[in-house]
Amino acid sequence: MKRYEVTRGCTFCATCIYECPVEAIAMGLEGARIDQEACIACGVCRENCASEAIVEIEFDAKRQKTEPTEERKQP
Ligand code: SF4
Ligand code: SF4
């Protein structure tokens, strides 16, 4: 599953906020912030960020939910 995140390279230009089709981005004190619940992972924000401050990352929802100690409990 793809996810998009804003890095520290954000220059507060706000372009991504206007370009996002689902209004999933808001400006915070440290730059633009993506609401991961609202984001549909279209990539438009990354394509339009002149500072290349938005990155695409792989997000494995299953792995995040799995307890790393679960396997060790097996006899
Ligand atoms: S387009 Fe890029 S630089 Fe501009 S506010 Fe969004 S993340 Fe920051
Ligand atoms: S990937 Fe698309 S939906 Fe998600 S924050 Fe960027 S522009 Fe908005």
Image: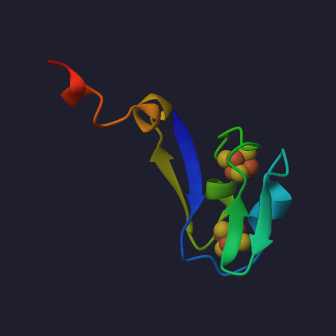
**Residue lying at the far left of the rendered structure:** 75
Report whether 30 appears left or right of 19.
Answer: left
- In the image, is residue 28 above or below residue 55? below
Q: Quadrant of residue 9?
A: bottom right
Q: Quadrant of residue 34?
A: bottom right
- Which residue is painted at 19% across and 30% down in the image? 72
Report whether 75 appears left or right of 73.
Answer: left
**Residue lying at the far top of the rendered structure:** 75
Report whether 66 appears left or right of 29.
Answer: left
Q: Is residue 44 visible?
A: no
Identify the image quadrant of the C terminus.
top left
- Which residue is painted at 59% across and 74% down in the image? 51
- In the image, is residue 71 above or below residue 17? above
Figure disc tally = 0
**Where in the figure is residue 52, as x and y percent of width and height?**
55, 67
- Which residue is painted at 23% across and 26% down in the image? 73
Q: Is residue 8 visible?
A: yes
Q: Nearer the viewer, residue 69 or 29?
A: 69
- In the image, is residue 17 above or below residue 40? below
**Where in the figure is residue 54, as x and y percent of width and height?**
57, 62
- In the image, is residue 39 above or below residue 45? above
**Where in the figure is residue 70, as x and y percent of width and height?**
30, 29
**Where in the figure is residue 41, as x and y percent of width and height?**
65, 40
